Image: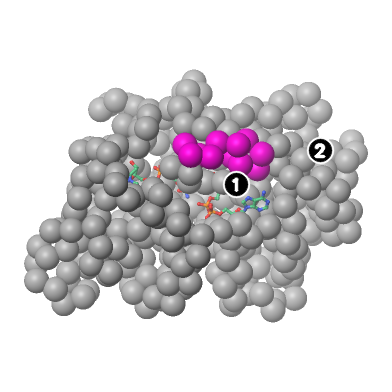
Amino acid sequence: MKNLLITGGAGFIGSHLVRRFVTKYPKINIINMDCLTYAGNLNNLKDVESQPNYRFVKVNICDEEAVNQVFAEHKIDGVIHLAAESHVDRSITDPMSFIKTNIEGTVVLLNAARKQWGNNFENKLFYHISTDEVYGSLGDEGLFTESTPYDPRSPYSASKASADFLVRAYHHTYNLPVVISNCSNNYGSHQFPEKLIPLIISNIKQNKALPVYGKGLNVRDWLYVEDHAAAIDTIFHKGKLGETYNIGGNNEWKNIDLVKLLCRIMDEKLGRNVGESEKLITFVTDRAGHDLRYAIDSSKITNGLGWSPQVSFEEGLEKTVSWYLANSQWVSEVISGEYANYYKQQYENR
Ligand code: NAD
Ligand code: DAU
C-alpha cells in the first residue's frame, strides 16, 4: 500500500496515529484529512508536518466532491477512518452534528473508496475506528466481546453503531475490504480537555471545581493512547478482512477513584499538601442516560494478532500529567474561545 488516508488526524488519537505511521513507515504517503473542528489542532503534528511522506488536506468528510477529489488526486489505496464527533455530552445537546459526521461522513468515505477502487481490491483496505460504547452498558459483571449485541444508548454511540453497520454492509454487499475495531476509553497527551482526565488535570491546576457526574460510580476501562495506536497498526497490517476486533486496557476504574488518584498525583507534582486537590471534588447532576460500566475482552486481538497493552496505568498517567503540566500553552489555547462557552453551558448551575 502506497497512499494511506487517515481521517481525523488532527485530533487526539488521530495525531498519535499519524505520528506513528509517518515516522515508522517512510514509504507510505500519509494523507491526513481533517476539517479542523474545535477538536482538531494542527499544533498536535508540528513535529511531523515537514516530513516528505506527510500531507494535510483540510476537507470535511461530508463534502462528497472534495473527498472524491482527494481519493483521485492522491490515488488513495488505504483508509484509516477516525474523523468523528467524539464527545458524549455534546451529542446529548447537539445530536445532528453527530449524525452528519459520524454516519453521513462515513458513507461519503465508503462511496469514495468504492469509486476509486472499482472492483480491484488488491492491497486495498478501509479500516473503521469505532468505540466500545456501541455495546451499551454492563452491570457489575461481564465483559464486551466481539459478539456482544449492539445496544447503543447515547446519540454518540448510536451514530458510531450506525457507521459500524454501514461499514459491515459495504463489505457484505459490495465486497469492500473492511476491518473495524472497537476500543475502550483512551487517555494521554493532546486529548481535548472536555474529556474526564485532561479536564480534571486542567481544573486541579486552576484550583477549579472537579465535576464528578452522579456519585462517581461509573466504570471505564482506560487504555494509553499509544497502545491504541499500536493496536491499530497491528490490525491494519494483520487484521482479517470483514472482522471486528475489540481493544481494551484491562484497566477498570470507578470515576471517583480515578479522580482521587489524579488529585494525589497532582498534589505531589504541584507541591501541594496531601488532600488539598481532593477538596475541589464536586458531585454534579448526572449525565443523561449515563452508561454504568464499560469493560473489554481483548482476547481476540491478543491471541490472534499478538497485541497487548504495554504501558501501565501508573506510567501512562505519569506521562500524561507531566505532558499537560509542561504544555500549559497548548491547554490555554484550546480552552479559550468556543470551549469557554461550552464549559459555561455544560457546568454552570449543574
Ligand atoms: P477527537 O474529537 O479528539 O478528534 C476528532 C477529529 O476529527 C478532530 O481532529 C476533528 O477536527 C475531526 N473531524 C470531526 N468532524 C470532522 C469532519 N466532518 N470532517 C473532517 N474531520 C472531522 O476524537 P478522538 O478522541 O481522537 O477519537 C477519534 C476516533 O476514535 C473517533 O472515531 C472516536 O469515535 C474513536 N474512539 C475514541 C475513543 C476515545 O477514548 N477518545 C475511544 C474509542 C474510539
Ligand atoms: O469508551 C470509549 C469512549 O470513551 C469514546 O468512544 C468516546 O469518544 C470518549 O469520549 C469516551 O467516552 P466517555 O463518555 O466514557 O468519556 P468522558 O471522558 O466524557 O467521561 C468518562 C467518565 O467520566 C464518564 O463516566 C463520565 C464521567 N465524567 C465526565 C466528564 C467530562 C464526569 O464525571 N465528569 C466530567 O466532567
Circle 2 residue: 111
Q: Secondary structure at mark 1?
A: loop
Image location of residue 8, percent across then percent down: 63, 55
Q: CA distance from mark 2 to mark 1?
A: 17 Å
Residue pictured at 29% horizontal, 25% vertical:
139
Ligand 1 within 8 Å, label 1 CB: yes
Residue pictured at 67% horizontal, 53% vertical:
7
Residue type (three-letter) at the residue carrying disc 2: Asn
Residue type (three-letter) at the residue carrying disc 1: Ala
Residue 334 is left or right of residue 71, and the answer is left
- In the image, residue 233 sits, relative to residue 88, either above or below, namely below
Q: Magenta residues, as a range?
A: 91-101
Q: Nearer the viewer, residue 120 or 279?
A: 279
| Quarter-of-image position of residue 318 | bottom left
Residue pictured at 58% horizontal, 66% vertical:
41
Magenta stretch: includes residue 94: yes
Colour setup of the view: one colour
Magenta stretch: includes residue 297: no
